[in-house]
């Protein structure tokens, strides 16, 4: 019996040591990027051989060759990717999703000859337009997001980079470069107005870059600015974190008959007379935390009709 117990205890000791060694140094293969010193980024922990994905990008659920095919086949919640060459045609989006399930149109860096959106509940991202017919991107609808797109050198028309009309809009992380005021244009980076187009409400314009823009980075006109149709209101804009380089206008941002604009954390990178203009009852504006070029005379120009509810630095003169 004494020998048997010694053998048993020895066997148990060896087994425990083997188990501890296995736990300390597992024999299964390590996953790529999992604490192995490589720069795994968002793919850390992905299995070896798994397909690479773009950070934050949704996988394609529908492949279409043309916008017309996408309009016919897309359903709420789809992410549409285009397999055909759209570099010589304008991307026209007429099919929207639902409030809960927008349709995403994903470019992945693809070239298009400008974008027109006439739909609700869509997200348009990742397209590149070089010298498109102006406006480079035009969106009309509700609950529309335009993000991570590039417009370079829009031509013709009034030369604008982006025009927008509607409610609950988000314009974020886009780049517009090289708008041209020649031939009598007023080539803004972004513009909205309310004439034969609907007024806009709850618009977020965040973290965009307006580079080498001849006219203003944003021209926003409501329905009662003297040129609008006088119907409704334009209100509740958030302008935050944008980089603005305007080369020829007197101001970088201009609001006429736009109520409740919040303008914070932007960089005004080129010399203008003033950075922000508020006119025609553009009341309730809040201005804070912006950075301006040393050649800008004063940050805010305001008329008497826009002073109600204003919060921000002391205005330096008229808009």
Image (tube, rainbow, N blue to C red):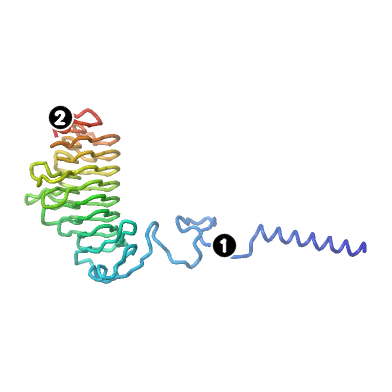
Q: Nearer the viewer, residue 190 or 38?
A: 190
The structure residue drawn at horizontal position 22% and vertical position 46%, both measured from the top left corner, is 201
| x and y, in percent, of residue 204 in the image | 27, 46
| x and y, in percent, of residue 308 in the image | 19, 31
Q: Which mark is residue 236?
A: none
| x and y, in percent, of residue 171 in the image | 26, 50
The vertical placement of 17 against 63, above or below, is above
Say which element carries label 1. loop
Mark 1 crowdedness (10 Å alpha carbons): few <14, some 14-19, many ≥20:
few
Q: Nearer the viewer, residue 37 or 196?
A: 196
Say which element carries label 2. loop
| Separation of residues labelled 1 and 2 (CA atoms) | 65 Å
Identify the residue under disc 2.
317
Mark 2 crowdedness (10 Å alpha carbons): few <14, some 14-19, many ≥20:
some
Asked if residue 184 can be seen in this view, the reply is yes
Which of the 4 quarters of the picture holds residue 26?
bottom right
Q: Which mark is residue 30?
A: 1
The structure residue drawn at horizontal position 14% and vertical position 41%, both measured from the top left corner, is 249
Q: Earlier in the sequence, mark 1 or mark 2?
A: 1
Q: In screen coordinates, is 187 left or right of 121?
A: left
| x and y, in percent, of residue 315 in the image | 19, 29
Which residue occupies the extreme left position in the image? 184
The quarter of the image holding the C terminus is top left
Mark 1 vs mark 2, foreground winner is 2
Q: In screen coordinates, is 157 left or right of 83?
A: left
Asked if residue 254 can be seen in this view, the reply is no
Q: In screen coordinates, is 7 left or right of 97?
A: right
């Amino acid at each position: 019996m004494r020998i048997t117990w010694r053998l048993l205890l020895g066997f148990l000791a060896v087994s425990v040591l083997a188990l501890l060694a296995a736990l300390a140094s597992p024999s299964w293969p390590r996953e790529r990027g999992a604490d192995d010193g490589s720069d795994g980024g968002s793919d850390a922990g992905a299995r070896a051989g798994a397909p690479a994905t773009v950070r934050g990008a949704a996988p394609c659920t529908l492949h279409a060759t043309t916008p017309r095919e996408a309009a016919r086949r897309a359903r709420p919640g789809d992410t549409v990717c285009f397999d055909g060459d759209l570099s010589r045609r304008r991307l026209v989006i007429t099919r929207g999703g639902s409030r809960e399930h927008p349709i995403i149109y994903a470019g992945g860096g693809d070239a298009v000859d400008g974008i027109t959106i006439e739909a609700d509940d869509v997200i348009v991202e990742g397209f590149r337009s070089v010298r498109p017919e102006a406006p480079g991107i035009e969106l009309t609808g509700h609950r529309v997001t335009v993000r991570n797109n590039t417009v370079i050198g829009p031509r013709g028309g009034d030369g604008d980079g982006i025009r927008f009309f509607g409610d609950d809009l988000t314009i974020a992380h886009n780049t517009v470069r090289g708008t041209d005021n020649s031939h009598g244009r007023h080539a803004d980076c972004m513009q909205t107005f309310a004439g034969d187009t609907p007024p806009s409400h709850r618009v977020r314009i965040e973290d965009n870059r307006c580079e080498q823009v001849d006219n203003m980075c944003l021209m926003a006109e409501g329905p009662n600015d003297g040129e609008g149709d006088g119907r409704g209101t334009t209100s509740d804009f958030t302008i935050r974190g944008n980089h603005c380089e305007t080369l020829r206008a007197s101001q970088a941002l201009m609001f006429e008959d736009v109520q409740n604009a919040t303008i914070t954390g932007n960089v005004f990178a080129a010399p203008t007379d003033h950075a922000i203009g508020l006119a025609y009852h553009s009341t309730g504006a809040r201005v804070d935390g912006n950075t301006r070029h040393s050649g800008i005379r004063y940050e805010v120009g305001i008329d008497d009709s826009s002073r109600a509810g204003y919060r921000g630095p002391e205005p330096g003169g008229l808009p």
